[in-house]
Image: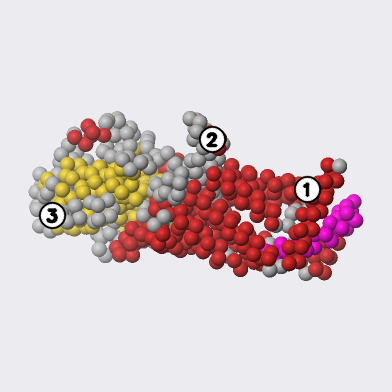
Amino acid sequence: MDDKRNLIFAVLLTGLILFGWPYVASYFFPTPPPVSTAAKSSGSVSGASTSEVSVEAAPAKLQAVPLGNALQSSARILVETPKLKGSVNLEGAKIDDLVLLTHRTELAKDSAPVRLFAPSGTKNAYFARFGWAGTGIIAPNDKTVWTPSGNKLTPSTPVTLSWTNPQSQTFEIALSIDENYMISAKQRFTNNGTAPAEIANFALLSRTGKPADATKGGSIFTHIHIGPMGVFDNKPNYDWGYIDVEENKGETSFSSTGGWLGFTDKYWLGALIPDQKTPVSAKFRASGNVYQAQVIPTRYTSVAAGAALETNSRLFAGAKEMAVLDGYSKKLGIPYLDYAIDWGWFWFIAIPFFWILHWLFGLFGNFGLAIIGLTVIVRGFMYPVAQKQFASMAQMRAVQPKLKALQERWKDDKPRLQQEMMKLYKEEKVNPLAGCLPILLQIPIFFALYKILLLSIEMRHQPFVLWIKDLSAPDPLTPINLFGLIPFDPPSFIAIGVLPILLGVTMWLMQKLNPQPMDEVQKQVFAVMPWFLMFIMAPFAAGLQLYWVMSNLVSIAQQKWLYSRHPVLREQMARDAEEKAQAKANAQA
């Protein structure tokens, strides 16, 4: 009875750890209240505070219009780079039309490229805008029509947008773009008027609707931060989701010197990056189904008549390719831009392993082979730990006959049985918990690898061999429809592919090599576990399934090799198998 109670307690504890950690963390480590946007003092910024400035109100509702109509409704300049294509809307100087040329919506090569930005008024509107706010001036707004210096923005041809107000004050946005996903905006205000002007530049991102996979919270397995994110005062902040901003009266504010903020999706990122030496006020706003990220200096700057003010900002709009993000962080001094990828609690393991996987992909040219190579490296790295675990299991297997004798002798006296078992462990110098420590050490590594394989855009739409055409999608081949021979798409919860089946089989084989639990209930639980995990893992990415299958195969090979070095254990296994066969024969007789 005690064994059963302990088993139930262990199962419940494991479930709480795996699925309840986010809720425990939110209780013991609550999200701090929004930081006030009160202005910070700085020698380079002067004038009144901008903390109460409304940069641009988020509309409560947008009327959906066809994308083609929206793109043709106003004058535009083209955007062309090796990775981006689109246009800039001269009405409002909005960067609202960008597609990612190297990433497609579907696996087919002729499928459309992924659209990141779309004009205001369309179904999935998503755009960026640079502008000014101030007092005593007529600033450009989202309806202002700008004059461009050229008709195409490319890495070799920057374009300057300009507009002059009735006060003879000129506003300019000098746009330049690199070969990846970074747009630079040099905002220049020239005060040709007769009086000083109080002014501050701003940048905003606006999007309509939430991504389908945006969530609030989640288990340690399913949680990926998708939604508002920023780095404020050199600290990444994942605390706010779309729903959180809505529930916080539609606005969340931060103060920071430099940093960045924006919206992170699973594979894509839109981020506003102010000058890294400027104190700024950052906001996330929600109104209806429209969400905005805004950044503005904490104070207005006074610009005398005849003087000018020039500021620099950037916009990242593209795929979360780790090498690109890391390069921007190092070369441009943008803090933690690579942390737009939510590596999780075990980031210190995940990031080095990602670079190993990235290197292996460059070596093999196949992401599946890279995963296999990473599996071998990880299992080799963990071999000393696995050897200690094996030694503990070997000791437990060696004393099992004596434990069985004790159980038979003291089956009606549980306290005495526990005493005798502890005495036996002490005499035989066996620690029944020694095998748990190696397992605990492997948990962070598994979760880190899980995050890598789940979030790496480098694995998206990457083939392996035969029927596996996309390692970021579940294994498509399932016996439920006779491997595609029957024209039937089974529900995801029963669409068990070949890799999940192999995962279950290899886990079952691993259990056969381990000492069997002495308690019958434990035996039943362990017998069901491989097939339970087979169903659990079926909807996950084939890349993760491949890693687990290969990890199991390497573990089986390691165990076989270790058994070959311990003839006594091999003999014990043979005796156990013979006793089991004899017991089965007696039962049938």
- The kind of secondary structure element at disc 3 is strand
Based on the picture, tell me whether residue 394 belongs to the magenta stretch: yes
Measure the alpha-carbon separation of dots 1 and 2.
36 Å
Give the residue type that dot 3 points to: Thr
Q: Is residue 255 above or below residue 145?
A: below
Disc on res. 120: none
Q: Position of residue 157 (x, y in %)?
A: 15, 54
- Foreground tag (1 vs 3): 1
Q: In terms of sequence position, does the residue under pointer 1 or pointer 3 come before the other?
A: 3
Q: Which residue is mark 3?
A: 190
User: In this view of the protein, which residue sits in the foreground, 396 or 3?
Assistant: 396
- The residue at the point 44 percent across, 63 percent down is 356
Disc on res. 520: 1
Where the C terminus falls, by quadrant? Answer: top right
Q: Position of residue 354 (x, y in %)?
A: 44, 59
Based on the picture, tell me whether residue 385 belongs to the magenta stretch: no
Q: Quadrant of residue 514?
A: bottom right
Q: Is residue 12 visible?
A: no
Q: In terms of sequence position, does the residue under pointer 3 or pointer 2 come before the other?
A: 3
